[in-house]
Image (spheres, grey):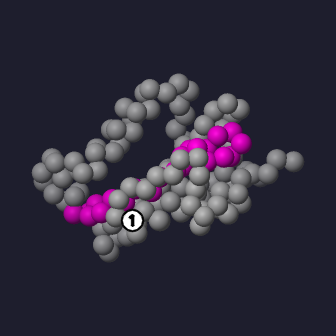
Amino acid sequence: MKSTKWSPPPAGKYKLNVDAAFIPETGVGGIGAVVRNDNGEVMAAMALPLARVVNDVKKDEEESWASDGHLIGDIKRSLQHFEDVIISYSPRGANQVAHFLAKHALNCNTMVTWIEEVPFWLESIVNDDMVVSS
């Protein structure tokens, strides 16, 4: 049976998990991201609010996405600077930390980052979501 919990990257590598949350009624969105090492320790985490997403998409002007920085293109260009990058889908159960960060971003006014730590309200999720090897 395949696990639905977070699993670590190969030894000496890092894993980036990303998730998004969206409130259709308000058009507000958020992105959560977390980088963890092969021991599951958090190296960096981020919550990025994306206010007025629906309104920006509806606009005809090119600059309507300027505040969010052409996100997909930026991600693809950034990934070109790394070796051994693998992009794959993870079910929600294997992506809980990023999911909670994305939900948190819905209530933020600006991007929030943590380096080598996580907020206290996320600690138990970080600890509980790893696959325990036998």
Under circle 1, the secondary element is: loop
Task: Please say if 118 is above or below 107.
Answer: above
Q: Nearer the viewer, residue 109 or 128?
A: 109
In the image, residue 128 lies at what x, y percent?
71, 60
Q: How many marks?
A: 1
- Magenta stretch holds residue 41: yes
Q: Residue at x 22, y 58 (%)?
A: 56
Q: Residue at x 40, y 69 (%)?
A: 107
Residue 25 in view, yes or no: yes
Q: Residue at x 37, y 32 (%)?
A: 77
Q: Quadrant of residue 111?
A: bottom left
In the image, residue 106 lies at what x, y percent?
40, 66
Q: Nearer the viewer, residue 71 or 93?
A: 71
Amino acid type, callout 1: Cys
Q: Quadrant of residue 88?
A: top right
- Magenta stretch holds residue 47: yes
Q: Residue furthest left?
A: 61
Q: Residue at x 22, y 48 (%)?
A: 66
Q: Which residues are magenta?
A: 34-55
From the viewer's perspective, tell me whether residue 75 is left or right of residue 5. Answer: left
In the image, residue 81 lies at what x, y percent?
44, 26
In the image, residue 47 lies at what x, y percent?
45, 57
Residue 92 in view, yes or no: no
Q: Residues within 10 Å of mark 1 (few under 14, many from 20)?
A: some
From the viewer's perspective, tell me whether residue 125 is left or right of residue 69. Answer: right
Q: Which residue is mark 1?
A: 108
